[in-house]
């Protein structure tokens, strides 16, 4: 029974630590998003930005909305960019320069937002 309990605790406690869910600071994430200019592509709240991908980033058809992303998903995505397991040269270049704490902070910032129903990408019919 003790072995089962220890296994259970390890399964519950270790994944959040491994994915960096603990310790994200949304205020620090906001500062990072502004200083790293994440807002140029993803918008000030992570819901996208009108036309920026088409204008500034060659061969980018769309920019994903990152507002309201679950923390663990955001962190896994950024780590995948950082290690090259997820395609995206622009994001890889940025992610390689971020510490694990930076990624947790960004995850906390963008995860604290409520996504809009429609992002304002350049192909949005409202543009």
Image: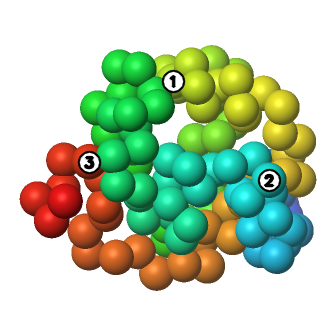
Q: Where is residue 86 in the image (x, y as percent from the top left)?
A: 52, 25
At mark 3, the secondary structure is: loop
Which picture quadrant has residue 3? bottom right
Q: Gap in Å between the C-alphas at discs 2 and 3?
A: 23 Å
At mark 1, the secondary structure is: loop
Q: Which mark is residue 88?
A: 1
Q: How crowded is mark 2: few (under 14 residues within 10 Å), some or many (20 or more)?
A: few
Viewer-side residue, 37 vs 22: 37
Q: Residue at x 50, y 54 (%)?
A: 42
According to the picture, the residue beneath numbered tag 2 turns out to be 35
At mark 2, the secondary structure is: helix
Query: Where is 42 relative to 60, above or below?
Result: below
Q: Residue at x 34, y 76 (%)?
A: 116
Viewer-side residue, 78 vs 73: 78
Query: Where is 82 relative to 68, above or below?
Result: above
Q: Where is residue 103 in the image (x, y as percent from the top left)?
A: 77, 51
Q: Earlier in the sequence, mark 2 or mark 3?
A: 2
Q: Which residue is drawn at 65% across and 40% down?
A: 78
Q: Where is residue 18 in the image (x, y as percent from the top left)?
A: 79, 49
Q: Which mark is residue 122?
A: 3
């Amino acid at each position: 029974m003790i072995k089962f309990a220890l296994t259970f605790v390890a399964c519950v406690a270790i994944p959040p630590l491994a994915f960096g869910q603990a310790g994200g600071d949304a205020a620090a994430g906001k500062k990072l998003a502004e200083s790293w200019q994440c807002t140029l592509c993803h918008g000030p709240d992570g819901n996208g930005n009108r036309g920026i991908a088409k204008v500034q980033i060659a061969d980018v058809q769309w920019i994903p909305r990152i507002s309201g992303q679950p923390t663990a998903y955001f962190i896994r995505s950024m780590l995948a960019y950082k290690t090259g397991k997820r395609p995206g040269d622009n994001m890889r270049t940025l992610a390689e320069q971020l510490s694990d704490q930076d990624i947790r902070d960004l995850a906390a910032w963008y995860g604290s937002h409520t996504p809009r129903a429609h992002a304002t990408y350049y192909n949005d019919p409202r543009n």
